Amino acid sequence: MFPKVGKLEQYKLLVANPIASKHIPVTLEYSKENLLHLLDLYQIVYIKHDTSGQGRGVFKLTKRENNFQTLNGYSIVGKVVNQELEIDQIHSILHPFERLGRLNPYIIQEGVESVSKNGQPLNIRVHVQFIKTDWVIGGMYASVGFNDLEENGVVNPNRGSHIVSIQELFQSFLGLDHDQERNIMSKISSVSIEASKAIASKYWSREFGVDIGLDHQCEPVIFEVNTTPGIGGFYKADKKLWEHIVDTRKIL
């Protein structure tokens, strides 16, 4: 079984890659001091549990003019959180058992808004595979948030986002022309392969699932790299892509 690589460890490996390092948000290990530091720099900050998945333990923190911050997201057990809180109150939510000496590992990140032309949060899953001697793209699909997901920015099919094909994302949700599509697709592919190489340099795997966002200039932003990627989303987005990944897995 391949190891679950924590988000902070991922960041350290990605920042060492000359290409991937240009496409990652500023990331720090969680502490109240580091959280205050990033809130001085950015209007929006994300707090993420270091090893959780499926959208659990992910929060969007929006800075307000007073001492309160708006915290939206999901607790480590998947409970919806939507409150205005002070930093100490946020810390208590993240570490409910601190008095017993039990601390949850979190990272904090610069908030990069990855949204459609209508403001819907979006995420692109890129499946990367190592075949013979080369890293190749097995396929891509997108998840797009609707309704309450627009508040917390957590885009995950397990939290109610909609799965669409990459073509539908580009054409219907981003309004791109064919030249723009090809350009962005090329950038996403290159960044995803470099991200996979970075993680594989220490944690070898023949497959990775790279979660990519697009900033306001449609530049790729690496959100996370999954060392044991599921492929169920491809079945919903494009069955032919799913079949292609399955066939390649048989060869591997």
Image: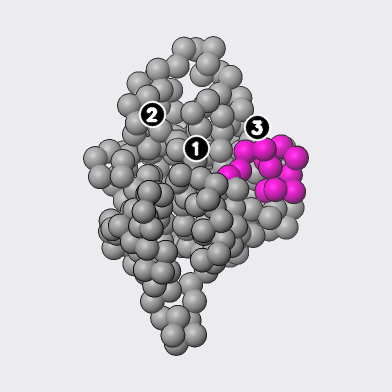
Determine the residue positioned at 52% across, 59% down: 35
User: The disc labelled 1 sits on which kind of residue?
Assistant: Gly
Is 37 situated above or below 141? below
Which residue shows up at 41% across the image and 81% down it?
Answer: 97
Q: Is residue 19 magenta?
A: yes
The magenta-colored residue range is: 14-25
Circles 1 and 2: CB atoms closer than 8 Å = no
The residue beneath circle 3 is 190
- Specify few, some or many for label 1: CA neighbours under 10 Å numbering under 14, 14-19, or 20 or more: many
* Residue 127 in sight: no
Q: 191 or 66, which lies in front? A: 66
Secondary element under disc 3, as helix, strand or loop, is helix
Nearest to N terminus: mark 2 or mark 3: 2
**Which residue is pictured at 65% across the width and 45% down the height?**
196
Please name the colour scheme applied to the rendered image.
Answer: one colour
Q: Nearer the viewer, residue 11 or 95?
A: 95
Work out whether 70 lies above or below 195.
below
Quadrant where the N terminus sits is bottom right
The verdict on residue 197 being magenta is: no
Give the farthest residue toward the front. 66
Observer-side mark, 2 or 3, equals 2
| Label 2 crowd bin: few (<14), some (14–19), many (20+), radius 10 Å | many
Looking at the picture, how far across and down is residue 88, in whole percent?
41, 69
- Mark number, residue 116: 2
What type is the residue that disc 2 sits on? Ser
Where is residue 19 shown, x and y percent of the image?
71, 37
Q: Amino acid at mark 3?
A: Ser
The residues tagged by marks 1 and 2 sit, at their Cα atoms, a distance apart of: 11 Å
Which residue ends up furthest to the bottom in the rendered image? 100
Judge left or right: residue 119 versus residue 3: left
